Amino acid sequence: MDFTVRKYKELLNLMKDAGYEFQTYTEFINAPKSKVIVLRHDVDLKPENSLCFAEIQASIGIKGVYYFRAVNESWNEDIIKRISSLGHEIGYHYENITTTKGNLTLAFEDFKKNLELLRTLAPVATICMHGSPMSKYDSKDLWKTNDYKSLGIIAEPYFDTDFNKVFYLTDTGRTWNSEKFNVRDKVITTFTQKFTYTDQIIDAFVQKKLPSQIMFTFHPQRWNDNIIKWLIELISQNAKNLVKRLLIKIRN
């Protein structure tokens, strides 16, 4: 079974065995190591799953970055503070153009308000857009008329990472880098390696066939050992994928 916590632990251990170091995104931006993995987590739903991931990582000396949305399904202040206390980075997973229905002025004010609130819980130096696949708005457009660096933000992955040097892997759509089900979580890259299953990535680590710098994006709500929760997520994601595939065709 793929997308279980057991499979996630196996993947983490193989990363370590392959000789990679781990940095938060801020650490990577400030002083990137030569053989390194950045573990990014988009806390879209079920923040308790993200806490589970954070505790697993901390238990084996690994750090990552966790991006929280400013919605009830994600924003859990106790969990945010707990993940930060484990040594992980906290960031803002923004979607303000969607939540303000395209009003760029209101969106920037909403962004600043949520950023300030998040900074009362943990240091925040990086941000990352939430794809909002069902929305007609792309939250990255907020930065066409505003500057996040003026707010003390040092980086946003989609703007400040060279994905021709950093190999990007995302579990969007409950698969890996699937263009069929991925509306906005895409990067421009020259890397050509393709994976569908986590075991294929594990095999690539074993065979030392992966680049020296990698960014993973995980959505921890997708990863469950409980068979009922695992099946619910599988059925729910398959339904979402059908809708997203139709949206991609329409928008293209």
Image (cartoon, grey):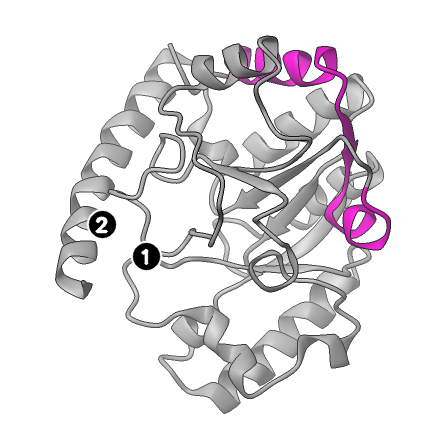
Q: Tell me the element at label 1.
A: loop
Residue nearest the viewer, comparing 25 with 9: 25
Q: Where is residue 29 in the image (x, y as percent from the top left)?
A: 78, 53
Q: Which residue is drawn at 57% across and 83% down?
A: 108
In the picture, which quadrant includes the N terminus? top left
Please indicate, yes or no, whether residue 225 appears anywhere in the rendered image: no
Residue nearest the viewer, comparing 38 with 151: 38
Residue type beneath disc 1: Pro
Residue 244 - label: 2
Residue hosting label 1:
133
Residue nearest the viewer, comparing 120 with 97: 97
Locate residue 65 relative to residue 171 in the image: left or right.
Answer: right
Residue type beneath disc 2: Lys
Q: Does the magenta stretch include residue 23?
A: yes
Label 1: few (<14), some or many (≥20) within 10 Å?
some
Asked if labels 1 and 2 touch by Cβ distance under 8 angstroms, the answer is: yes
Q: Residue at x 57, y 19 (%)?
A: 209
Q: Is residue 4 magenta?
A: no
State whether residue 228 is above or below residue 144.
above
Q: Where is residue 91 in the image (x, y as percent from the top left)?
A: 68, 55
State whether residue 186 is above or below residue 250.
above
- Distance Cα–Cα, label 2 vs label 1: 7 Å
Tell me the magenta residue range: 5-32
Please indicate, yes or no, whether residue 68 appears anywhere in the rendered image: yes
Displayed quadrant of residue 62: top right
Displayed quadrant of residue 103: bottom left
